[in-house]
Each structure stands twice: as structure tokens, then as C-alpha cells.
Image (spheres, rainbow, N blue to C red):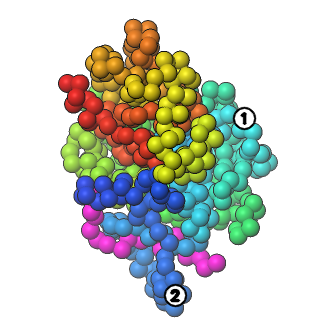
């Protein structure tokens, strides 16, 4: 298999398009008849491209590509065949996820592996994952003012090396409660040592490709080495490009490595007290990349550090999860959450999220009692609706419209809008099933509505994968009342299962 250096992670265009028509066209391709997972904007080089690369002077190609990468050109991204790609994230489904980030880390890496790349994911070992085994590889890392030892666990699934960073800062806090306690003991309350936890993750992720001798794949063996593209996801992994430059490239290591920073949700940026910069063990020259002032008093008043800002500035490329969201992020302070000016400076490329069509496939879904496809959907849906009603304890009535909501219970997802609309929907003789965790006040609000309308409303405030699949398959409508939505995998899942996305229609009908 031919191998290209990571310097071939280049753009083919100097222009960036994020028109709504493009987004609609991309979404329209994701339906029940789709048989392959697509991530628009990512593709392997075709045969002609490969031939040209083989016959081109290697030094000239690398030099030109590195110059292009340094200037961060915008446009469609090409991944050369045979690249070493390492995804770094705080979540990775199905082992750990609170939402779309975990879903993407579950589905995108296998899709990239299927394109011929060698792919690894690195995330914390929050729990005693039964399918991940101890590699017996240990490394010492400086976190804060201490040197700690981490070890790596590993499993090989669907062509991807799944690597888990093992340390008590991850395992002891979350063990047995992975779904709800990844970032804090409860929604809206973070662990005080989150900076140290995710600093540890970033450093461990940089060590993994060099120290792990992995031989599970029939096509690849040994360590990934230093010729790697790291894909850092959201603020939790934003220190990765900083550590790459300060700890490795300053010593002649990882000289060809590149970092792509992907924004899944800009509402969460990792803002901390400015004095905390010293806890990150970075040289002073990086301080300006973190420096941030906002008008809020949390976590402290005045000057702060902002992890996401640093990740955007220090990475080689910046991506986000849809062309439309990329357009929103640079539209102004409101949608860009005070980082719009930074993103306009660096540039950003939007690539529509794809779903994992192995997990989300009505023809083989292990969580639903009736399998179906586009030709049998009309016969299967009524049966699955009845099964969902029975599962949650609602009256089984095929004539009553059944509406589902799956998501975090917080303002961004429009949970308060949903709660206000439920009495109006009940008045129209609808049933509503709500699945999600979040802010305790919103959980109680939804649960109170179940008490108030026992024949029409069910609220399940916990992480439940099987019920999520049953809702997607059995509901007539899926509501997505989000105030903003970076991409919205839930809509793609619903389209795949023949369930109507009807948020705008239904909410306008109740107003």
C-alpha cells in the first residue's frame, strides 16, 4: 500500500462554500436507501491522483503541501491514501458518550479505516470496558506539579485501534456511571480537576502512536510512528497542538505531524481562571493564544484562559461538523460565542457529519423487534410504535400521534421550549416520549409533566441506548427544538428510520 506523508493533508480550493443548498443536498443523500456512510469533503485520492503522486518529485510535493498547510487554505479536504490518523476525544461511542461527539467518534473512524487509512482513537478509560485489554505499556507524564503514570488499554474493532488512557482521574470518578459523569458529578457542575484530566489525555494521546506496538490489523503492524495526523475534538483535546509544538517538535520529534481541530459545539470552550495557565506546563509564548476576556463572572471575573481559542489558533486546520455551522460560527459574536473573530482569522471548513450506518440500520438493528427497510417501512412502523408505547407504559393506540425527543435537557437543545409546548401537544391528543439527562431543574420539569399527563407523557431521565433506538424507530415524529444545532445526528437517524423530522411544523401549529 502506498503511503503519503501527513503533509499531503491539503486543500484543493482557496474558496469555502457553505450555502444552505449544499447542506440540504448533503442531508438528502442520507436516507433509508443509503448503503454507505459518507462524510462529505473527505475522500481518498483516485487512481489518477495516486499515479501522479508516485511520479512527482517527492521533495517538491512535500514542500508545496507544507506551505499550503501553513497558510491554512480553505476548501475541500483530501486525505491521501494510507495516512496514519489519530482521533483524540473525551468521548467515544459506544464506550462513552453524552451526545453527538461520542457518536461521531464511534462512526467516523471506521469509515476512515475503510478508505485505506490506519486509524486510532484515544479517549479516557472511564469504566472497566470488558472488550479492552491492558497493553502493559506505561508512560510517565507531568500533569500540574506532579508526575503521574498512565497505562494504555486497547481493542481492535471494525478496522480501528481503540486506545483507552487508564488513570484514576478518569476511572475513579466515573466507574459504573459513564453516561452521566464524564465531565462532572451532575449536569452543570464540572469536576474541579478537569484541566488536569484533559491535559493528561492530550499528553497521553501524543505518546500512544509512538509507544504502542499494535498488530491487530492484517494490513498494518507496529507503532504508528511520528508521521501522523491528529484530529482533536472540542476543548477537551485543545492542548494537543500546544504540547505537540512545545514538547515534541521543539526536540525534533513529530516534525511531519499535523493537528486538525474539530469544533462540535462552540458553546463549550474550556474557560478557566487566567492564573491556571501555569497548571498546563506550557511555555510563556503560548499564553497569548489562551488569553481571553469576556463579560461573565464564571469561573472567575475578568481575564481568563480559553482552551478552544488556543486549539483553533495553534492547529494546522480547523473543521466543524457542517458547512452551515461553519457559516454560523463566523457570522457574529452570538453564534460564534465570542470566538467568531478568531475563526475568521484562521478560516474553517465545514464537513457534514455522517452517521454510523451499521449501528443505525433498521434492517439489522438489534434493539428493535421488527426489522425493515424502505420497502417494508409502512408495515413495520405501526408495530414498532405499539412496542414503544408498551415499553414506556403509554396506552397502545395506533391512531394517536407519537412524538419523540432525544437529547440533553438544557437551553441549547430547547428543552424549556419543549416543556412549554407539551401541554399544547397533549391538548391535540398527542403522546410524547422524552429521553435525556441534563440540568436537574429541567429533568424535574419534564418528570412533573409526566405526573400531570399520565396517559400522554413519559419522561426517562437517564442514558438508555436501547430506548433511543426504539424511539427513533417507533415514533411518528422526532422533535428537535434546538436554539442552535451544529449538525444534528438525531435528524439523520430519524431520516434513516423513516421517522418525520417535524419540529418547525409542529411548534408553529401549537403557537
Q: Which is more toward the observer, 47 or 206?
A: 47
Q: What stretch is highlighted in magenta?
A: 1-18
Above or below for 72 versus 32: below
Which of the numbered marks, if any, corresponds to residue 87?
A: none
> Which label number is shown at residue 128?
1
At 20% across and 45% down in the image, what residue appears? 332
Q: Position of residue 31 (x, y in %)?
A: 43, 53
Cβ–Cβ below 8 Å for labels 1 and 2? no
Placement of the N terminus among the 4 image quadrants: bottom right
The total number of labels drawn is 2
Classify 354 as above or below 258: above
* Camera-side residue of 46 and 449: 449
Secondary structure, mark 1, is loop
| Residue 327 visible in the current orientation | yes
SS under mark 2: helix
**Circle nearer the N terminus (1, 2):** 2
Amino acid at each position: 500500500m502506498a503511503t503519503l506523508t501527513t503533509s499531503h493533508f491539503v486543500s484543493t480550493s482557496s474558496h469555502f462554500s457553505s450555502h444552505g443548498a449544499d447542506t440540504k443536498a448533503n442531508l438528502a443523500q442520507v436516507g433509508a436507501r443509503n448503503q454507505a456512510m459518507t462524510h462529505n469533503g473527505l475522500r481518498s485520492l483516485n487512481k489518477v491522483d495516486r499515479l501522479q503522486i508516485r511520479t512527482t518529485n517527492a521533495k517538491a510535493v512535500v514542500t508545496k503541501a507544507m506551505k499550503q498547510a501553513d497558510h491554512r487554505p480553505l476548501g475541500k479536504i483530501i486525505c491521501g491514501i494510507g495516512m496514519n490518523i489519530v482521533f483524540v476525544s473525551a468521548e467515544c461511542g459506544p464506550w462513552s458518550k453524552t451526545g453527538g461527539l461520542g457518536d461521531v467518534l464511534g462512526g467516523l473512524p471506521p469509515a476512515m479505516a475503510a478508505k485505506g487509512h490506519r486509524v486510532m482513537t484515544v479517549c479516557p478509560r472511564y469504566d472497566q470496558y470488558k472488550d479492552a485489554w491492558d497493553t502493559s505499556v506505561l508512560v510517565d507524564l507531568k500533569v500540574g506539579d506532579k508526575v503521574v503514570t498512565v497505562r494504555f488499554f486497547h481493542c481492535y474493532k471494525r478496522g480501528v485501534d481503540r486506545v483507552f488512557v487508564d488513570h484514576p482521574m478518569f476511572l475513579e470518578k466515573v466507574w459504573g456511571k459513564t453516561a452521566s459523569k464524564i465531565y462532572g458529578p451532575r449536569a452543570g457542575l464540572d469536576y474541579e480537576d478537569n484541566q488536569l484530566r484533559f491535559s493528561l489525555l492530550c499528553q497521553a494521546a501524543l505518546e500512544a502512536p509512538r509507544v504502542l506496538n499494535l498488530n491487530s490489523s492484517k494490513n498494518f503492524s507496529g507503532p504508528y510512528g511520528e508521521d501522523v495526523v491528529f484530529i482533536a475534538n472540542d476543548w477537551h483535546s485543545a492542548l494537543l497542538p500546544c504540547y505537540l509544538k512545545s514538547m515534541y517538535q521543539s526536540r525534533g520529534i513529530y516534525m511531519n505531524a499535523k493537528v486538525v481541530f474539530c469544533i462540535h459545539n462552540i458553546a463549550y470552550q474550556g474557560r478557566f481562571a487566567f492564573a491556571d495557565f501555569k497548571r498546563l506546563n506550557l511555555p510563556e509564548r503560548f499564553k497569548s493564544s489562551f488569553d481571553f476576556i469576556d463579560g461573565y463572572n464564571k469561573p472567575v471575573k475578568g481575564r481568563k484562559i480559553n482552551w478552544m481559542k488556543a486549539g483553533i489558533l495553534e492547529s494546522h486546520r480547523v473543521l466543524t461538523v457542517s458547512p452551515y455551522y461553519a457559516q454560523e460560527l463566523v457570522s457574529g459574536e452570538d453564534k460564534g460565542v465570542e470566538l467568531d473573530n478568531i475563526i475568521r482569522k484562521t478560516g474553517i471548513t465545514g464537513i457534514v457529519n455522517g452517521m454510523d450506518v451499521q449501528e443505525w440500520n433498521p434492517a439489522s438493528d438489534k434493539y428493535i423487534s421488527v426489522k425493515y427497510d424502505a420497502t417494508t417501512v409502512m408495515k413495520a412502523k405501526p408495530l414498532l410504535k405499539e412496542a414503544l408505547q408498551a415499553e414506556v407504559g403509554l396506552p397502545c393506540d395506533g391512531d394517536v400521534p407519537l412524538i419523540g425527543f432525544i437529547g440533553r435537557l438544557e437551553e441549547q437543545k430547547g428543552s424549556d421550549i419543549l416543556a412549554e409546548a407539551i401541554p399544547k401537544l397533549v391538548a391535540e391528543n398527542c403522546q410524547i416520549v422524552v429521553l435525556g439527562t441534563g440540568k436537574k431543574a429541567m429533568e424535574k420539569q419534564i418528570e412533573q409533566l409526566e405526573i400531570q399527563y399520565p396517559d400522554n407523557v413519559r419522561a426517562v431521565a437517564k442514558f438508555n441506548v436501547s430506548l433511543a433506538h426504539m424511539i427513533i424507530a417507533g415514533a411518528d415524529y422526532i422533535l428537535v427544538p434546538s436554539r442552535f444545532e451544529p449538525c444534528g445526528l438525531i435528524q439523520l437517524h430519524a431520516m434513516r428510520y423513516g421517522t418525520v423530522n417535524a419540529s418547525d411544523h409542529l411548534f408553529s401549529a401549537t403557537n
